[in-house]
Image (cartoon, rainbow, N blue to C red):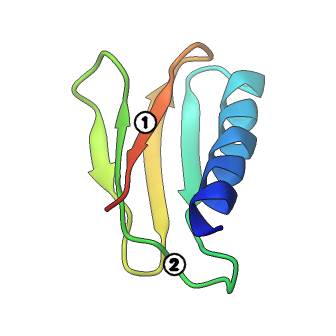
């Protein structure tokens, strides 16, 4: 169930990215209880990557509208 919510959140964040061009992008990964999820986040096909904090927050700068966010969660 947590993974399902995780991917729904990813979809919402991806739509927000498409709506803007070359702007900062901040996100929050959390489970159904609202607790932060620590994960690796990267931009497909680039060297841009980050790790969400234990509170689930992460951010990128200068993303393009067609960038694809990849999340790895163990």
Q: Foreground residue, 70 or 4?
A: 4
Q: Which mark is residue 16?
A: none
Q: As displayed, is residue 22 above or below residue 73?
A: above
Which structural element holds mark 2?
loop
Which quadrant holds residue 19?
A: top right
Q: As displayed, is residue 41 above or below residue 18?
A: below
Q: As displayed, is residue 8 above or below residue 2?
A: above
Pick the quarter of the image with the N terminus: bottom right
Tell me the residue that label 1 is attached to. Answer: 70
Work out which residue is located at the far left of the displayed protein and give it. Answer: 47
Position of residue 33 in the picture relative to residue 55 (left or right): right
**Residue at x-position 51% and y-position 78%:** 36
Residue density around tag 1, few if under 14, some if 14–19, many if 20 or more, within 10 Å = some
Q: Are marks 2 and 1 in contact (CB under 8 Å)?
A: no
Residue density around tag 2, few if under 14, some if 14–19, many if 20 or more, within 10 Å = some
Position of residue 36 in the picture relative to residue 17 (left or right): left
Tell me the residue that label 2 is attached to. Answer: 36
**Residue at x-position 57% and y-position 59%:** 3
Work out which residue is located at the far front of the displayed protein and give it. Answer: 1
- Could you say where residue 71 lies in the image, as x and y percent from the top left? 42, 45
**Residue at x-position 71% and y-position 23%:** 18
């Amino acid at each position: 169930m947590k993974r399902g919510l995780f991917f729904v959140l990813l979809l919402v964040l991806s739509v927000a990215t498409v709506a803007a061009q070359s702007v900062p992008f901040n996100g929050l990964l959390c489970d159904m209880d609202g607790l932060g999820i620590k994960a690796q986040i990267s931009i497909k096909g680039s060297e841009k990557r980050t790790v969400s904090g234990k509170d689930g927050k992460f951010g990128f700068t200068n993303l393009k509208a067609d960038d694809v966010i990849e999340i790895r969660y163990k």
